[in-house]
Image (tube, helix red, strand yellow):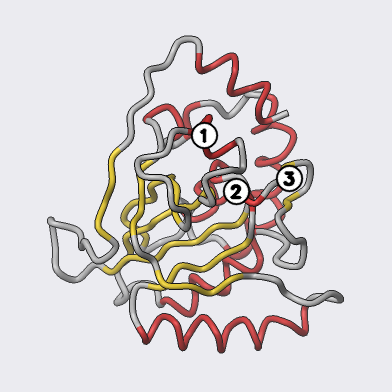
């Protein structure tokens, strides 16, 4: 369904993408930290993390592959090695990385290999791209702690981030801009409703 929605949008949208160094910090303040997660369709994950108090921004993009400056079409082919991810800037004084990890496990099914629902392919894999040794340690501990919630083994990758590529502009704030689009209504809205008690923002 996602691909069908995209075809309609792509006819009227220009592709735009940019590479961001993995260790780049927010220029507006030195108190912000970065976190990068992949949990299926980035529209879905973005919509969840945008609602957390302490998260300053969420950017949809691509990471984990070899192709430089990939386009959405190329990532959807499954041949680039990239996953759809979101990179968020957060204030650790307001929300901890451990709390972000807790929401990450709740926001998708980390036990399905290269799949989330009807979205199938390596681009939809569950992955945590860490930005520091501290994040790596926290992610590994959180993964072990979260396993009890799931009847099947967690298959989430935990790997260092090298380069993050921002996705095309029309992917940014997708749910906010298209709440009534079929994919949003059928997939994202029910997920947000389920997670509502855990989200700090309405």
Tell me the quarter of the picture where residue 87 sits. bottom left
Of helix, strand and loop, which one carries label 1? Answer: helix
* Residue 117 place in picture, x, y as percent: 78, 47
Quote the CA–CA distance across marks 2 and 1.
10 Å
Residue sitting at 80 percent across and 75 percent down? 150
The residue that disc 3 covers is 120
The residue that disc 1 covers is 74
* Residue 80 place in picture, x, y as percent: 52, 45
Q: Is residue 100 above or below residue 180?
A: below
Of helix, strand and loop, which one carries label 3? Answer: strand
Residue sitting at 54 percent across and 52 percent down? 48
Q: Is residue 184 left or right of residue 113?
A: left
| Residue contact at pointers 2 and 3, CB within 8 angstroms | no
Quadrant (top left, top right, bottom left, bottom right) of the N terminus: top right
Which disc number belongs to residue 186?
none
Q: Is residue 85 above or below residue 1?
A: below
Q: Is residue 161 left or right of residue 5?
A: left
Q: Is residue 33 left or right of residue 128?
A: left
The residue that disc 2 covers is 123
Residue sitting at 62 percent across and 24 percent down? 180
For marks 3 and 1 on the same chain, the one whose residue lies earlier in the sequence? 1
Residue sitting at 44 percent across and 54 percent down? 63
Tell me the quarter of the picture where residue 54 sits. bottom left
| Residue contact at pointers 3 and 1, CB within 8 angstroms | no
Would you call the spot at circle 1 few (<14 residues within 10 Å), some (14-19), or many (20 or more)? Answer: some
Quote the CA–CA distance across marks 2 and 3.
8 Å
Q: Can you name the residue that lies furthest to the top here? A: 12
Of helix, strand and loop, which one carries label 2? Answer: helix
Q: Of the residues tagged 2 and 1, which is closer to the observer? A: 1
Tell me the quarter of the picture where residue 22 sits. bottom left
Quote the CA–CA distance across marks 3 and 1.
15 Å
* Residue 159 place in picture, x, y as percent: 48, 73
């Amino acid at each position: 369904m996602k691909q069908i929605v995209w075809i309609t949008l792509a006819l009227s949208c220009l592709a735009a993408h940019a590479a961001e160094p993995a260790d780049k910090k927010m220029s507006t303040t030195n108190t912000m930290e970065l976190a990068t997660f992949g949990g299926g369709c980035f529209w879905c994950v973005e919509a969840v993390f945008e609602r957390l108090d302490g998260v300053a921004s969420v950017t949809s993009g691509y990471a984990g592959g070899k192709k430089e400056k990939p386009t959405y079409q190329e990532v959807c082919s499954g041949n680039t090695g990239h996953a759809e991810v979101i990179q968020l800037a957060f204030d650790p004084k307001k929300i901890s990385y451990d709390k972000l990890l807790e929401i990450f496990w709740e926001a998708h099914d980390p036990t399905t290999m290269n799949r989330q629902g009807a979205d199938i392919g390596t681009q939809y894999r569950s992955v945590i791209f860490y930005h520091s040794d501290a994040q790596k340690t926290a992610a590994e501990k959180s993964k072990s702690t979260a396993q009890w919630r799931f009847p099947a083994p967690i298959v989430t990758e935990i790997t260092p981030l090298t380069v993050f590529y921002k996705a095309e502009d029309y992917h940014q704030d997708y749910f906010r801009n298209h709440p009534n689009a079929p994919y949003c209504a059928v997939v994202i809205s029910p997920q947000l409703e389920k997670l509502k008690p855990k989200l700090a923002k309405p």
